[in-house]
Amino acid sequence: MNAVFDVPLYPYQRHADQNAADPQRHQAVIVGAGPVGLALAIDLAQQGIETLVVDDNDSVSSGSRAICFAKRTLEISDRLGVGQQLVDKGVEWHLGKVFCDTRKVYEFNLLAESGHRRPAFINLQQYYFEMAMLERVRVLQQQGAPLQLRGGNQVTAVVSESDCVRVQLTTPDGAYDLEADWLIACDGANSPVRHALGLDFVGRVFEDNFLIADVVMDANFPIERWFWFDPPFNRGQSALLHKQPDNVWRIDLQLGWDIDRDAEKQPEKVRQRLEAMLGGDIDFQLEWVSIYTFQCRRMEKFRHGRVIFAGDSAHQVSPFGARGANSGVQDADNLGWKLKAVIDGSAPRELIDSYDSERIYGADENIRNSTQSTDFITPKSTLSRLFRDAVLDLAEHYSFARGLVNSGRLSVPCVYDDSPLNTPDGMIDGPSRTRPGAPCPDLALSDGYLLQRLGGSFTLLLLNIDRSTAVDDIDGALKRLVLDSSKDSTGALNERYLGSAKQAVYLIRPDQHIAARWSTFEPDAIRRALSRALAGGPAR
Amino acid sequence: MTLILSPNMTQPDPFYAALLSAHEGLSDAESQSYNARLVLILANHIGDFKVLSQVLDAAKVGSLGDDS
Ligand SMILES: Cc1cc2nc3c(=O)[nH]c(=O)nc-3n(C[C@H](O)[C@H](O)[C@H](O)COP(=O)(O)OP(=O)(O)OC[C@H]3O[C@@H](n4cnc5c(N)ncnc54)[C@H](O)[C@@H]3O)c2cc1C
């Protein structure tokens, strides 16, 4: 089979840098063209930063790996110019069902709140996600964006100096050196950059194996997430069935720790297992099979001088909860505007340290959630199995216990409550979901959506305040958006941004997180908050 | 008072994680007696015998004997 991921999309080409006598210098070098590296590259290039992406490979992710992309990722993708493409190709789903043995014990509905442009989740093969990003890279290049992508370029050594990062690469034509103002390691869980710098990666390894198979079949299972505890076809273990585009279905079977991995990977063996699950009369083809174990861990720090880690290289979670790629894309979202501000000199370098604190906070939340799911799905002691089974027994009868059934708490963006960039809440009685640190919830406006209007720069959102007067020294740095809640018949603006307040002013960061809010318009306060959101940078 | 069987915990996932970690490192016998102490403390907190009787009945579902 000639799968999309077998096709070279950015084959190695010799570059003039390789002939140069001295190492050539680049503003930003991104190692790894996975979902995180590509998202960051697009973000930086869209802001005019000279960006070079290198990858030792030249195609998209082999096999689908990540399949669930969350709303926040789609919103970020909108900003990067690929959101619509992802949604068009993806499969939307709302319903999740949890079975124990043959009984259904629990069902959840991701019923999206109205007024959001994007659904709570879509399922999409990771290779399609990456292909959409690669197409966007090509479009940006055609438009003259300072963005390069080099396949067949393997990073073999990295040295971080105070004023630059030295990088050694190996290509089919031999080795060459480069220099970077900033190097962002998006090189995945095994991160060679992390190894090159001798950095730690500590956490917990889960002693379990999962068979993961993407099968192509013409089945009429509903488009729902089905999760089994202890099903007849996989006794004592768990199982998952989920739809992807092109009639591809994701099947996940827990195998236990003590197995012969090579034997389990044999197509006949896999087939046997799948037939037991699907019934013998369904015709299916195997698109991709892999056996994986997983770990929950992170680096102690994500920034090391001029080297910054993002995505799986910085943190790794179990797949339950779809937090890997989703959180990595949020890393990119968090880092892009900060790098831009620092490179431009409109913020001090300390701004990058806030990437470290905010995304470590996010990683810890993701690790905590996925660890808890994993403990529930694969109980590792008699006692935890006892409680797990008790919850499942009770869940069938009592709604309280359903909330304790944990087959993966699906990824939502975190609120940077303690971020040094936040200004203390100037609207204490305002809605809690829009407190400083929170990502802006979307809203339907008469002409599009709020998040579309925010775009990717600092924005002052004025609600029921008509301020035509300019504030000289901040207006250049801020975009203004004025909204009137009396014109919003849905009431969402009131509910999400005003609460009991009559009017409000929000300062919104380029990554659409809220930096500050007040119930009155005070230029001095806005000035101070903007400066704080830039880690003390000048407010102009 | 009737027994609450709809969601009532403020933070279910953290509670569940804390419950399991309280058992970490205990032998089976120790876990059993820890559970017994838990039951008694929770029962005392509930107090009302009528509610406690409902608890005793409610817990009979599942593998013990199904009442549905
Ligand atoms: C079975 C499974 C299911 C998953 N399901 C989900 C899900 O539903 N939702 C979700 O959000 N996440 C999911 N994930 C996680 C997701 O796949 C990863 O989190 C995601 O791929 C991380 O992206 P990344 O860009 O950080 O790293 P990667 O995708 O690993 O990309 C790293 C890139 O770096 C390149 N590279 C490595 N070394 C070098 C080098 N020396 N020089 C140059 N380039 C190099 C590689 O070629 C690669 O292209 C799943 C993972 C697995 C395994």
Image (cartoon, rainbow, N blue to C red):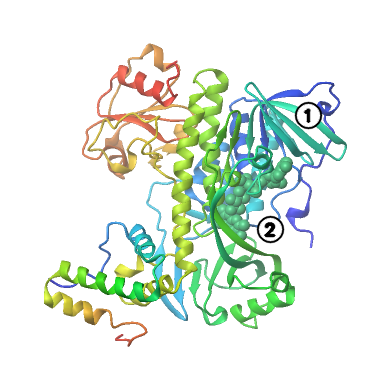
Q: Secondary structure at mark 2?
A: loop
Nearer-the-camera pick, A7 or A374: A374
Q: Earlier in the sequence, mark 2 or mark 1?
A: 2
Quadrant hosting residue A215: bottom right
Nearer-the-camera pick, A343 or A159: A159
In the rendered picture of this protein, how many numbered marks are placed on residues? 2
Q: Quadrant of the C terminus of chain A?
A: top left
Quadrant hosting residue A123: bottom right
Within 8 Å of ligand 1, the CB of disc 2? Answer: yes
A94 to A28, vertically: above or below? below
Which residue is rendered at x = 40% and y = 29% of the image? A421
Q: Secondary structure at mark 1?
A: strand
Q: What chain does badge 1 belong to? A: A
- In the rendered image, which residue does mark 2 sit on? A63
A540 to A95, vertically: above or below? above
A112 to A442, vertically: above or below? below
Q: How packed is label 1: few (under 14 Cα within 10 Å), some, or many (20 or more)?
A: many
Residue A27 location (% of width, % of height)? 66, 24
Looking at the picture, which amino acid does disc 2 mark?
Answer: Gly
- In the rendered image, which residue does mark 1 sit on? A177
Which residue is rendered at x = 52% and y = 23% of the image? A349
* Callout in the foreground (2, 1): 1
| A332 relative position to A413: left or right | right
| A363 relative position to A503: left or right | right
Quadrant hosting residue A404: bottom left
Looking at the picture, which amino acid does disc 1 mark?
Answer: Asp
Q: Quadrant of the N terminus of chain A?
A: bottom right
Asked if residue A506 can be seen in this view, the reply is yes
Nearer-the-camera pick, A178 or A100: A178
Within 8 Å of ligand 1, the CB of disc 1? Answer: no
